[in-house]
Image (cartoon, rainbow, N blue to C red):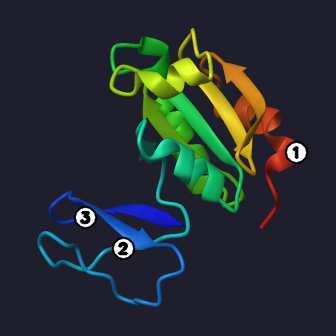
Amino acid sequence: MNMIIKCPTCGANNRLKEDSSNAKPLCGKCKSPLIVQQTTGPIYLTDITFDNFIRKSNKPVLVDFWANWCVPCRLLAPVLETFAQSQHSIIVAKIDTDKNPLIASKFQVFSIPTMILFVEGKEVKRITGALPLQALENQLKPWISIN
C-alpha cells in the first residue's frame, strides 16, 4: 500500500510504499528528507484512488466525506487530525465530495460530514455529523486496538 507524505520543506505530496526499504526517503520535488511517521494525519483520496486504497488496506479505514464550504466539516477536521495522530489501528482518509462526487454518490452520502468505516473493503459503520474526539473514539472503540 502507498502512503502520501507531505514534504516539510516545500509542501509537495510524495507517494511512498508503506513497506519501502528506503530508510531515508527524499522529496521528489526539492530533494529534502521526508519525515515518515506511523500516522501523519488524514490521507486524501479521490474518485480514482478510493476503491484501490480501501480494498488494499490492511487496517480499517475511516473515510470522512466533506466539503470546504461545510462549517461542521471544518469543525470536525481538527478532531480527525488528532484522532489520526493519536492511534495507529485505524487509517483516517478524507474525500472532498465537491471534487469527487462519484464515490459520495456510490455510498449514498446525502449529508456531510459523514464518516464511513471500512474493514476489508466493506462498510461496517457510518457516522453522520461532527463529533468531539471522545465521542468519535467511543463510536470506533471496537476497531481501536491499544498499542
Is 26 rendered above or below residue 106? below
Judged by depth in the image, the label closer to the viewer, 3 or 1, is: 1
Residue that label 2 marks? 35
Q: Locate the C terminus and report the quarter of the image it occupies.
A: bottom right
| Quadrant housing residue 48 | top left
Mark 2 residue type: Ile
Mark 1 residue type: Pro
Tell me if 70 is positioned left or right of 79 in this view: left
Is 13 rendered above or below residue 105? below
Residue that label 1 marks? 142
Q: Position of residue 91 (x, y in %)?
A: 61, 52
Q: Are marks 3 and 2 in contact (CB under 8 Å)?
A: yes
Which residue lies at the image location 33% right of the left edge and 26% below the top edge?
Answer: 99
| Quadrant housing residue 124 | top right
Disc 1: CA contacts within 10 A as few (<14), some (14-19) or many (>=20): few
Q: Position of residue 25 (x, y in %)?
A: 32, 82
Q: Is residue 113 visible?
A: no
Q: Which of 86/144 is in front?
A: 144
Farthest left residue in view: 30
Mark 3 residue type: Pro
Tell me if 3 is positioned left or right of 7 in this view: right
Q: Is residue 79 visible?
A: yes
Residue that label 3 marks? 8
Give the secondary structure at mark 2: loop
Disc 3: CA contacts within 10 A as few (<14), some (14-19) or many (>=20): few
Which residue lies at the image location 82% right of the left edge and 48% below the top edge?
Answer: 143
Is 73 rendered above or below residue 28? above
Q: Position of residue 73 (x, y in %)?
A: 47, 21
